[in-house]
Image: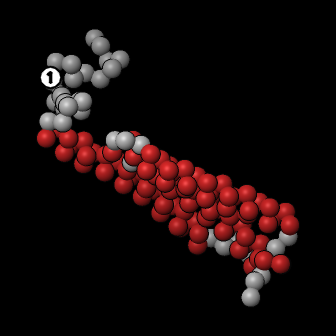
């Protein structure tokens, strides 16, 4: 049994647009995961696809069920906050772990760590 016949046409268009947008962004993230060469390039595309794609899909869900139930449906907001907060943090942790691994293995092309106080360790734009 489907309640989509109770959905006004203008809401259905907005929901359909957000669903297509969200699924398209998620697809672009998946294509980027397959297409890019290095780990550092690969980790960026799915993160953006997941955050923006899932965000658009969740907004579509909020709009659809809020109109159908004639009251605000907010439990999707918790899912949105969880996805938006955890995805970039996961990206940062994965990238830092990979950078640490590449530095300790001496992988060529990876910038070496410079400790504070060493020559060249000043931040850009902080010259005396």
Vertical arrangement, residue 15 with respect to residue 88, above or below? below
64 relative to 49, above or below: below
Q: Position of residue 59 (x, y in %)?
A: 65, 62
In-image side of 72 versus 98 (left or right): right
Residue 6 relative to residue 97: left or right = right
Residue corresponding to mark 1: 118
Binning the other alpha carbons within 10 Å of mark 1 as few (below 14), some (14 to 19) or many (20 upward) gives: few
Nearer to us in this view, 61 or 75: 61
Q: Tell me residue 92's x, y (percent).
A: 35, 48
Split into 4 quadrants, where in the image is the C terminus?
top left
Identify the residue at the far right of this view: 9
- For image coordinates 66% across by 54% down, the residue present is 21
Q: Residue at x 85, y 70 (%)?
A: 8
Q: Is residue 34 visible?
A: yes
Residue 68 percent coordinates (x, y): 77, 77
Q: Quadrant of the N terminus?
A: bottom right
- Residue 96 x/y as whole percent: 27, 45
Closer to the camera in the image, 119 or 25: 25
Q: Identify which residue is drawn at 24% across, 41% down.
A: 99
């Amino acid at each position: 049994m489907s309640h989509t016949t109770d959905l006004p046409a203008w809401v259905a268009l907005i929901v359909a647009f957000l669903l297509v947008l969200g699924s398209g962004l998620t697809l672009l993230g998946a294509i980027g995961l397959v297409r890019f060469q290095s780990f550092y390039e690969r980790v960026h595309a799915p993160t953006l696809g997941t955050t923006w794609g899932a965000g658009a899909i969740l907004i579509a869900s909020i709009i659809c069920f809020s109109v159908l139930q004639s009251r605000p449906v907010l439990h999707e907001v918790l899912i949105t906050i969880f996805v938006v907060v955890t995805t970039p943090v996961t990206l940062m942790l994965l990238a830092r772990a990979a950078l640490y691994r590449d530095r300790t293995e001496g992988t060529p092309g990876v910038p070496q760590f410079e400790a504070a106080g060493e020559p060249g360790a000043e931040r850009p734009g902080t010259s005396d």
